[in-house]
Image (cartoon, helix red, strand yellow):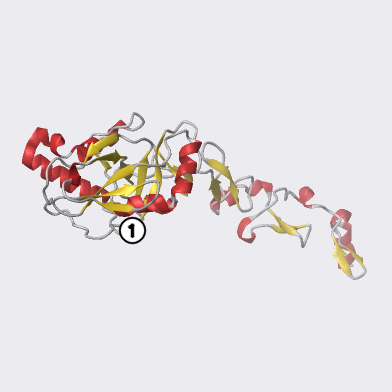
Amino acid sequence: MKIKTLLLGTSLSLIPQFVNAQCVATTDCATLGYTETFCPNGKGIKCPFGDKWACPSSKEETCAEYGFKYDCSGTGYASGSGTPCNNKYASCTCASGYEWKDGACTKRAGAILGQCTGYAKNCKIGQILNADGSCSDYRVSGVEPVGIVVYIGSDNCGQALALEGLGNFQWSTEYVDIPDLPNYSSKPVNDFSSCENTKTVIDYSYKQYGDSAYKYYPAFWQVYNYAPSSVPETKGKWCLPAGGVLDNIYQNKTAINQSLTRINQENVSSGTWWSSSENDDNGAWYWYASGGGFGNVSMNDKTRINYIRPVLAF
């Protein structure tokens, strides 16, 4: 009798039917109010009973409770990450140049031009260094190129070659072994201290000659006063490349020239380039851009006029 009463008080659509010993529901999830496609942490039922989770539409706040609260749209967003709940995501995939940080796609911090921050680990030799501190294979719309990456150290500090040369100048007009500037008796292929060398010469010459220092060390002061129109704030931060950086340019000249060509800038091709690496009181090191070798200048040759093209630390 109890069984009969139960059947009479139950909707026929909710009664399981046994077919080949399996229970098949004749009522779909939507009828029961389970309309969403995903429910986090098991708060729901499987619909249709064995396939995937469904959340009750009246419990939409459940998704936000478990972190599904981002619609992943707007500037810097690429798409949602993972499976959505109530059309929201637990995190987002960000567009190039952006990163997921503190619940948002924020502009990825670039390098600080003229200063090592370790950002160079995100770059590679031959890429373009842009005015916003980012590196790219091609020109980025709305951002000015500043240089071409020519060196990345084990400390993730980088150096970028200027997009133009500054002409031909003397390393020095006098024969002085600069205090605190290392001397290299053999090819300085392991000297990457472009900016340290430059600062040493600039400081020494200014202490000796004040505002007339540029007359005595023309190559260094031309580089020091360089200020490209794209980033005039970098004045005083450009450096005469050290011997090892120039050697690195030669080793990677194909990739470097490829990027220079893409942005219609002056290629690395020929000429003799001054380095900031010193030999002794009479000589400094210069580099043959066409052949890749170094020439150890002899007596009086610090006064020789050679090509200069700065680098910028980042």
User: Compared with residue 29, is residue 24 higher up or lower down, i.e. above or below?
Assistant: below
Given residues 2 and 88, the one toward you in this image is: 88
Task: In the displayed orientation, state which residue is furthest to the left.
Answer: 208
178 and 291: which one is in front?
A: 291
Residue 55: percent from the left, percent from the top? 68, 52
How many labels were placed on the picture? 1
The image shows residue 8, relative to residue 146, as above or below, that is: below
Q: Can residue 102 be seen in this snapshot?
A: no
* 279 horizontally vs 85: left or right: left
Q: Position of residue 44 (x, y in %)?
A: 68, 57
Can residue 312 be seen from the camera position used here?
yes
Query: What's under tag 1, amino acid-wise?
Result: Asp
View extreme (bottom): residue: 21
Residue 28 in the image: x percent, y percent? 81, 52
Residue 215 vs residue 268: left or right? left
Residue under numbered circle 1: 155
Q: Secondary structure at mark 1?
A: loop
Task: Point out the residue furthest to the top here.
Answer: 229
Q: Residues within 10 Å of mark 1 (few under 14, many from 20)?
A: few
Quadrant the N terminus occupies: bottom right
Depth check, front residue: 17 or 84: 84
Given residues 36 and 221, the one toward you in this image is: 221
Position in image of residue 193 (x %, y %): 26, 53
- Residue at x 31% of width, y 58% of height: 189
Above or below, 206 relative to 18: above
Q: Identify the residue shown where x is 32% and y is 31%.
A: 228
User: To which quarter of the image does residue 70 belong?
Assistant: top right
Q: Is residue 259 left or right of residue 226?
A: right
Would residue 23 appear left or right of 268 to someone viewing this image?
right
